[in-house]
Amino acid sequence: MKILVLGSGGREHTFAWKIEQSPLCDKLFVAPGNSGTSEIATNININVTDFEAIKKSVLEHHIEMVIVGPEDPLVQGVHDFFLADPDLKNVAVIGPQKAAAELEGSKEFAKEFMIRHQIPTAAYQSFTPDNVEEGYQFLETLKPPYVLKADGLAAGKGVLILNDLEEAKAELKSMLIDAKFGNASSKVVIEEFLDGIELSCFVLTDGTNYKVLPTAKDYKRIGEGDTGLNTGGMGAVSPVPFATQNFLDKIENRIVKPTVEGLKKDKLPYVGFIFIGLIKVGNDPKVIEYNVRMGDPETEAVLPRLKTDLVEVFNAMAKGTLDNISIEIDDRAATTVMLVSGGYPEAYEKGKVITGLELVEDSIVFHAGAKTDNKTVVTNGGRVMAITSYGNTYKEAIKKSYQSIEKLSFDKMYYRKDIGFDL
Ligand code: AMP
Ligand code: GLY
């Protein structure tokens, strides 16, 4: 089978790494890919939202399955584009159609979905520029901290958590009236603050059947001790040690099942990953957000623990026979640590030569913002590489990742030295 992965991050290198191990995969393409994917697959230099260019490549290379890494093409309807085109409609696409991708594309849509299907989440109300005054009044009824969320996609920056009421009102105005996040904040969801520890749960579904993948916890802040600016994610640990079987059962019964059943009831076709951001409040899970894709860097810790052939799983998802698959998970823990460019998530430089890659033996290096320049691997983004290791415990795994990192370097390389500190 000829397979195309869309995307260029550590998540997509991990998908490529796993797919490439499958005897069912004859030829693998990644678009646009990075230096890591170019070692195991053929990179195609096209943009993930350029559907016409994707079509051309799919036809030219006789691609039979497309795995969509990031959310943008899904929210813009790449799956629907394939279904509507007579030349593409038989290509399997792993990723939900546009209507269901709204679970990530619109916070209000996601909240309404959860309320409709009695899925536990924070209480909320949503506001537009027309009723901003009501928004101020609603804030006055809440206790701090105040949680404001831009409704649309805002590259992970659209959530503000504020301690001061006046500041919260000012930010609400800035989002709604001054378009702080552009069109994404033309609607704002204000919700109850949930106090607890976060974790993520990953689900595969064919629209009817589902399989739950291992949990993971990611570390979103740039600074140690979870301080400083938000990033795409600085590291991840899987499984999450505090997620006991009893807690996992609650997640499955109260959240995963009603989510998959709700998609079906609402006639939202879904073949793909559901990434559920959760918070443990007391002993109960509540949903913070849905994403319609895998997490990055969570993928770099979760997929290496999957023993089952991923292409077999994708085939079953595309055919609606996921119930026939048994998912086998490696008992070992896996952890990943992101190496980032100095300055990230603000301004940073690119093109720095990365040395020591050939010296890493005990970890898997997943490339992210890295490219090959004259046979040399150089930095090409904020998050540069994810260093994944296995261990009998997450502590053992994390130690291995840090030992491997000692061998790697590039100018202004930065990473958090405390991944897993709170577990
Ligand atoms: P989101 O983009 O919805 O995942 O929100 C980004 C981050 O904001 C989450 O990972 C949480 O740390 C935090 N957050 C979002 N919603 C809430 C909430 N209702 N209560 C507390 N923290 C929240
Ligand atoms: N690491 C968080 C995300 O992928 O959204």
Image (tube, rainbow, N blue to C red):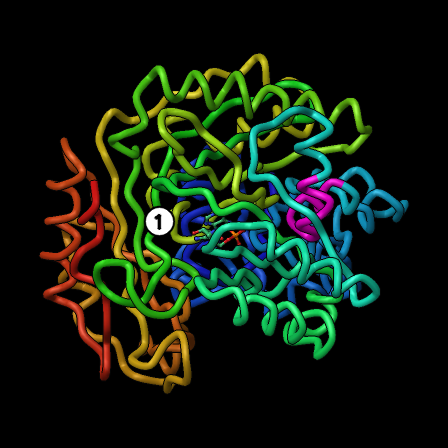
- On the rendered structure, is 15 left or right of 262? left
Instruction: Say if 24 sits above or below 217 in the image.
Output: above
Disc 1 CB within 8 Å of nearest ligand 2 atom: yes
- Whether residue 43 is visible to the viewer of this picture, yes or no, is no
Q: Is residue 334 above or below residue 6?
A: above
Q: Is residue 60 magenta?
A: no
Which residue lies under the disc numbered 1?
A: 218
Specify the quadrant that holds the C terminus.
top left
Residue lying at 57% horizontally and 12% vertically, measured from the top left: 324
Q: Is residue 171 visible?
A: yes
Residues 154 and 396: in front is 154
- In the image, 162 versus 204, the foreground residue is 162
Extent of the magenta region: 100-111
Locate residue 373: give its quadrant: bottom left
Residue found 70% across the figure and 45% down from its top: 101
Q: Is residue 106 magenta?
A: yes
Q: Give the amino acid at mark 1.
A: Asp
Q: Residues within 10 Å of mark 1 (few under 14, many from 20)?
A: many
**Which quadrant: the N terminus?**
top right
In the depicted structure, whether residue 151 falls above or below residue 198: below
Between 206 and 245, the one lying in front of the other is 245
Residue found at x 46% / y 55%: 145
Residue 126: x and y, percent?
A: 72, 52
- Give the main secondary structure of the magenta stretch: helix
Query: Along the horizontal axis of the image, is 370 left or right of 158?
Result: left
| Secondary structure of the residue carrying numbered label 1 | strand
Find residue 225 and report its horizontal and vertical position in percent: 22, 59
Give the x, y percent position of residue 289.
Answer: 56, 44
x%, y% of residue 88? Answer: 81, 46
Which residue is found at the position 37% from the left and 68% from the top?
A: 383
Instruction: Determine the image quadrant of residue 92.
Output: top right
